[in-house]
Amino acid sequence: MVKDMRTKYDKYWGAYNKMNDFMYFAILLDPTTKSPFLLHAFKKMIGYMEPSLTPASMDIKARQMVREVENRMKNLFMTYLERFDSGGSSQQEASQIVIDVDDDNDFFGDFLCTGGSNLDPTDNELRTYLKENIVNYKKDFSILGWWRVNAIRFPTIARMEKEIAQALNMLHIDDNDMGKKPMED
């Protein structure tokens, strides 16, 4: 039994550099944790796995790992946009509003047309979500309830959250079934 438990632990949590991205995405998709918690977790894991590193080196490595996870999540987000975005999110539509400016100031007009942002418009939904402050954790907080309310603001990310949660739940069900013997008649 201990061996089975250790195998399951190693499969999902054993090595931070081999862990399934969905585990990290689940942290980013929890509005009470997001990137700050992922950074904290990486620092702890690095400290445990590589105790010879200085705190500054651990911090640099952890921040780099958070950026890598966020970039992989961005890739997944872009895939979702390509597959499921039928009319563009409200943020994308807002960035495409025609702004009437003087011809003498094309440079400023160009800036205003981008919404004053240097971000790719298709990336705004994800960036906005990740940059917002984390939600204060309360004992009765419901992540699913939060996503139900905020799906209008983050439609693509809400779809990702729902499907990632379902996938992680399926992993849990599969693992629980592993130890069970088939029923006999």
Image (spheres, grey):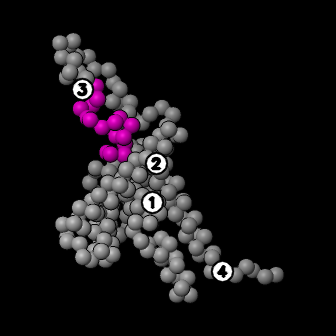
Please tell me which residue is depicted at 29% across the width and 58% down the height of the picture: 64
Q: CA distance from mark 2 to mark 3?
A: 29 Å
The image shows residue 137 at horizontal and vertical percentages of 31, 65
- The mark nearer the N terminus, 2 or 3, is 2
Q: Would you say the magenta stretch is mainly helix, strand or loop?
A: helix
Q: Is residue 178 left or right of residue 98?
A: right
The numbered disc on residue 180 is 4
Residue 143 in view here: no
The image shows residue 146 at horizontal and vertical percentages of 40, 55
Q: CA distance from mark 1 to mark 4?
A: 27 Å
For the residue pair 85 and 63, the one nearer the viewer reads as 63
- Please say if the residues under marks 1 and 2 sit with CB atoms less than 8 Å apart: yes
Q: Secondary structure at mark 3?
A: helix
Q: Where, by quadrant of the figure, is residue 133 drawn?
A: bottom left
Q: CA distance from mark 1 to mark 2?
A: 10 Å
Q: What amino acid is found at the position of numbered circle 3 in the picture?
A: Leu
- The mark nearer the N terminus, 1 or 2, is 1
Q: Which residues are magenta?
A: 111-128
Q: Secondary structure at mark 4?
A: loop
Q: What amino acid is found at the position of numbered circle 1 in the picture?
A: Asp
Q: Quadrant of the N terminus?
A: bottom right
The numbered disc on residue 21 is 1
- Local packing at callout 3 (Cα closer than 10 Å; few below 14, some 14-19, many 20+) is some
- The mark nearer the N terminus, 3 or 4, is 3
Please tell me which residue is depicted at 43% across the width and 47% down the height of the picture: 75
Residue that badge 3 annotates: 112
Q: What amino acid is found at the position of numbered circle 4 in the picture?
A: Lys
- The furthest residue to the bottom: 1
Q: Is residue 86 left or right of residue 63?
A: right
- The mark nearer the N terminus, 3 or 1, is 1
